[in-house]
Amino acid sequence: MRDVINWGILGAGNIAGALVEGIREAGGRVAAVGSRDAERAAVFAGRFDIPASYGSYEDLLGDDGVDAVYVATTNELHHRNTLDAISAGKAVLCEKPFALNAHQGEEMRAAAQSAGVFVMEAMWMRFIPATVALLQMVERGDLGEIRAVAADFSFQANAGPEHRLVDPALGGGALLDLGLYPISLAMLLLGEPTAISAQASIGPSGVDEQVAASMVFPGGQVGSIYASFLADSPVEAHVVGTEGRAWVRSRFHNSERLDVVAPDGSVTVHEYPLAGNGYRFEVAEVHRALLAGETESSLRPLADTLSVMEVLDGIRAQIGVRYPGE
Amino acid sequence: MRDVINWGILGAGNIAGALVEGIREAGGRVAAVGSRDAERAAVFAGRFDIPASYGSYEDLLGDDGVDAVYVATTNELHHRNTLDAISAGKAVLCEKPFALNAHQGEEMRAAAQSAGVFVMEAMWMRFIPATVALLQMVERGDLGEIRAVAADFSFQANAGPEHRLVDPALGGGALLDLGLYPISLAMLLLGEPTAISAQASIGPSGVDEQVAASMVFPGGQVGSIYASFLADSPVEAHVVGTEGRAWVRSRFHNSERLDVVAPDGSVTVHEYPLAGNGYRFEVAEVHRALLAGETESSLRPLADTLSVMEVLDGIRAQIGVRYPGE
């Protein structure tokens, strides 16, 4: 592994562009981009000043100058793209949802372990300074014993019938794209839930347009989350403890602020400015791990990712959302 | 019926004292108080300058000078006290929860209808000016189509083993005392849910110390609520619409403020100062209805109260909380 990590971007959509900046801010080099559409790849390369572009994912993965791949395709492709990248010996940062279901996720983990290749879910929330501070705050007991975590993630997507968010074949639905954030936050703080119940509103295409879930955790804590692409909700999180509560301002997954409310009602504001591209923190973790020769991130191990996938599977079973081939 | 309503207070606890002030601010007269403990009743009467006190509920209900009774006993007594008051021909404002379950509630409604006596649940939130304004805002469509309602109601009760909140025999649990508020708000706005799922943390005495529920409503809206007596949560409500959302500040059930967030992020603050005792609004509704000769409030009809009781019954069945005799 070189001192500077050379990245290949697999997919050429909006999120891919955002990561290019994050990679550079984290000191990485973007060596190439690959898309199924050669022109789209070339346009992306030109726009972001990337030396190489490929008209197929295979060609990107065949580039010896690429150390790590960021999988930025639509949800249903994450599994295939990650397996192919592992086969090509590339480290992988895979956009969330990591896979369509836990079974796919297990295959990805097994392949990575077998090949000794680094793989991490792009759960960037985990590495945002405010999230890190929140976890430390909870770990230190600053909020006392945690009793509840509540969070929401909804925005008005105005998703027409062609939008990926409503297409079951592309792994659409509010849960996998949005609900996964509040669920991941609750699980970061409280571990695996012992029980979950969910309700959803299913749209004409068969995916969940809105979903709400109630959880209980081993310590008796409750989780209360909802997600939707039909309207703008606060997109905030509340971590309720016996000695105070933390209010993570919008959007909680990349917040720059924690308001801690003490039992006497007094509020202490902690600020954690992103001061740049919010994706650079997860990229920095990939860099650190790769340079240390690690095959998983200790901060976002695949076990955590797969726990979340299992919860998502359980919720989908309850709300009756299945993807083609499941 | 006289021009000034004469009230009897059935029970002599904290909530009873709060209502005495509300009754007076609403122009009513507090004629008597009754408790199972004559001394407690006398102390209460002295403290609040009430002309008569009785050492039994029966004696209070036998007082011809009393037009209306406020039932302020513990949860398990609301059913019996209300039935007895109806038998005595007294109008009833019954503290929430209206009953332990929908079956009790149905009996209370049937008795009231049969006797032609006014009965209303003391769901004071319904009459708070901010709530009234919120309902009008939603009705006018100011927030577009409503997509979600989220609310929480938790506080740190430090309830020892003797506390009524943890006693199943007294109808304890977070759901009936606290969860009922966010559920009632969601149902005021969205009607009866088509499906509900809940999870809870059950304490050593067998009641729910914490509860979270996910709901879906006929228009596909979702509801996300939680309640607990183990820690202080925000106690706020969010009403999420396609053209804006309303943030009802703590405590949402008697808030003095609605912050309306437009799709462009701009916030308009609407203030609704209580300017006095928050209970006086529900009392004023009782006065209005009684003087008009009505036997139910059109703003909080018993049908609404019973719908909520049915939801509470359904949640308790899911979380496994039963009261003695059920």
Image (spheres, coloured by chain):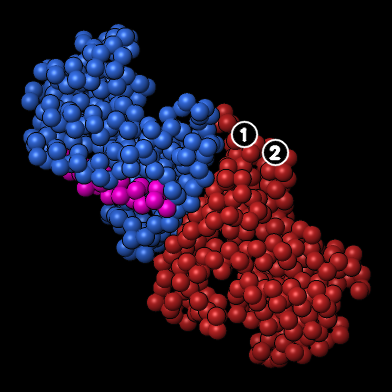
Chain colours: A red, B blue
The answer to whether one can see residue B199 in this image is yes
**What residue do we see at 13% from left, 30% from top?**
B87
Q: Measuring 65% from the left and 77% from the top, which residue is drawn there?
A: A104
Q: How many marks?
A: 2
State left or right for residue A37 relative to residue A195: right
Counting from the top left corner in percent of width and height, residue B57 is at 23, 20
Mark 2 neighbour class, 10 Å CA radius: few under 14, some 14 to 19, many 20 or more: some
Image-based side of A74 in relation to A108, left or right: left
Chain letter for mark 2, please.
A
Left or right of B209, for residue A120? right
Q: Which mark is residue A243?
A: 1
Q: Which residue does the numbered mark 2 point to in the structure image?
A: A141
Same chain for the residues at labels 1 and 2, yes or no?
Answer: yes
Amino acid type for the residue under numbered disc 2: Gly
Badge 1 or badge 2: first in the primary sequence? 2
The answer to whether residue B299 is magenta is yes
The segment highlighted magenta reads: B296-318
Mark 1 burial class by Cα count in 10 Å: few <14, some 14-19, many 20+: some
Q: Identify the residue at image location x=7%, y=25%.
A: B1
Q: Secondary structure at mark 2?
A: loop
What amino acid is at disc 1?
A: Glu
B83 or A140: nearer the viewer: B83
Q: CA distance from mark 1 to mark 2?
A: 9 Å
* Residue B105 forms part of the magenta stretch: no
